[in-house]
Image (spheres, rainbow, N blue to C red):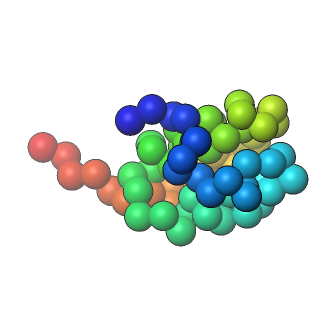
Amino acid sequence: MTDSPTGIIPEELMYKEKRKQVRAWLIAQPLPGHIKRDLLFGWARTVYVRLSANEVTEVESSGLQTPQG
């Protein structure tokens, strides 16, 4: 999976002013943490913002656990 948020994160959230809403939206998605993290990074690059470590951890830790095998 690519980390491009285009077509995944809703268009209305593709603004730097929507930082909190993007995190909430990603947290609510039933996706593995590493995919949520990659989407958050892609969003940040697209709208030109720097993320804090806490923001990344918050989103990544909300992810589904992937089976180890």
What residue sits 59% from the left and 52% below the top? 9
Q: Position of residue 37 (x, y in %)?
A: 54, 43
Task: Please name whichever residue, 65 or 17, is drawn nearer the observer in this view of the structure.
Answer: 17
Residue 11 visible in the current orientation: yes
64 on left or right of 53 = left
Residue with the most extreme left position: 69
Q: Position of residue 44 (x, y in %)?
A: 72, 38
Image quarter of residue 51:
top right
- Along the horizontal axis of the image, is 40 left or right of 31? right
Task: Between residue 49 and residue 65, name the one nearer to us.
Answer: 49
Q: Is residue 30 above or below residue 51?
A: below
Quadrant containing the N terminus is top left
Quadrant location, the C terminus: top left
Determine the residue positioned at 45% across, 50% down: 33
Q: How many marks?
A: 0
Q: Is residue 60 visible?
A: no
Q: Residue at x 87, y 53 (%)?
A: 17
Q: Residue at x 76, y 41 (%)?
A: 52
> Residue 14: image x %, image y %?
73, 48
Is 62 placed left or right of 59 in the picture? left
